[in-house]
Amino acid sequence: KNEVEQSPQNLTAQEGEFITINCSYSVGISALHWLQQHPGGGIVSLFMLSSGKKKHGRLIATINIQEKHSSLHITASHPRDSAVYICAVTMDSNYQLIWGAGTKLIIKP
Amino acid sequence: EPEVTQTPSHQVTQMGQEVILRCVPISNHLYFYWYRQILGQKVEFLVSFYNNEISEKSEIFDDQFSVERPDGSNFTLKIRSTKLEDSAMYFCASRNTRIMNTEAFFGQGTRLTVV
């Protein structure tokens, strides 16, 4: 069983739509990370959460520790948001990052 | 804004050759990591490094791999005798403490192609 599960695997939407990507995990964590991987492969850290909610521009990330679940939302989506979004968790036992498989997002103009 | 830089961005090498992937972490960071992503697969942890020694390594990080911080600024990953299955994107990351709730910063990656 994967320790970090993301859904959906692929998501195609029209420009302007509200996007939600989900992440569930099964291990004890100290933090959850949302990262963006560009088509060229580079990885950018978007958020790191240990509780509650964070907002940066059109991106919002939430986490529910009790339910072991996090969501990444994009408001007013734009074609430049097209990328792979990866959820990763820092395990509280050994500080390692456990990575999800990623959600490939395509925003059509 | 400080950033982690990796060179080269793309390297093609023949099977059996040695390669060295270079990373310059953020200057006041103390913990360094290498990850790899085989095309179409998840990112995988390779190794973490602190105080000039390996802190943890995965089962992927076998005797063919080594890391070092030769000069206080570079952090290198060496693959001694590359295999076709070493073809992947390799990412370096750094953070300034081992405290769990600090962010790691990632380089743009080196795409290694073994032919």
Image (cartoon, coloured by chain):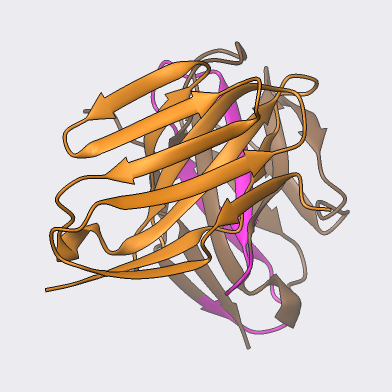
Residue at (52, 51) in percent of width and height: B91
Q: Position of residue B36 (x, y in %)?
A: 62, 57
Q: Position of residue A82 (x, y in %)?
A: 27, 64
Quarter residue A4 falls in: top right
Give the answer, above or below, for where B84 lies relative to B36. below
The answer to whether residue A47 is visible is: yes
Give the answer, above or below, for where B35 lies relative to A84. above
The residue closer to the viewer here, A13 or B73, is A13
Q: Position of residue B10 (x, y in %)?
A: 43, 70
Give the answer, above or below, for where A2 lies relative to B3. below
The residue closer to the viewer here, A68 or B87, is A68
Residue furthest to the bottom? B115
Q: How many numbered dots are placed on residues in this image?
A: 0
Q: Is residue B34 magenta?
A: yes
Instruction: Specify the chain shown as orange.
Output: A
| Left or right position of A48 against A56 | right
The residue closer to the viewer here, A39 or B49, is A39
Magenta residues, start to end: B12-41
Residue at (31, 53) in percent of width and height: A19
Residue at (43, 28) in percent of width and height: A62
- Chain B, colour shown: brown
Q: Quadrant of the N terminus of chain B?
A: top left
Q: Is residue A47 magenta?
A: no
Q: Position of residue A47 (x, y in %)?
A: 39, 31
The answer to whether residue B106 is visible is: no
Give the answer, above or below, for where B30 lies relative to B22. above
| Left or right position of B49 against A34 | right
Q: Quadrant of the C terminus of chain B?
A: bottom right
Residue at (44, 50) in percent of width and height: A21
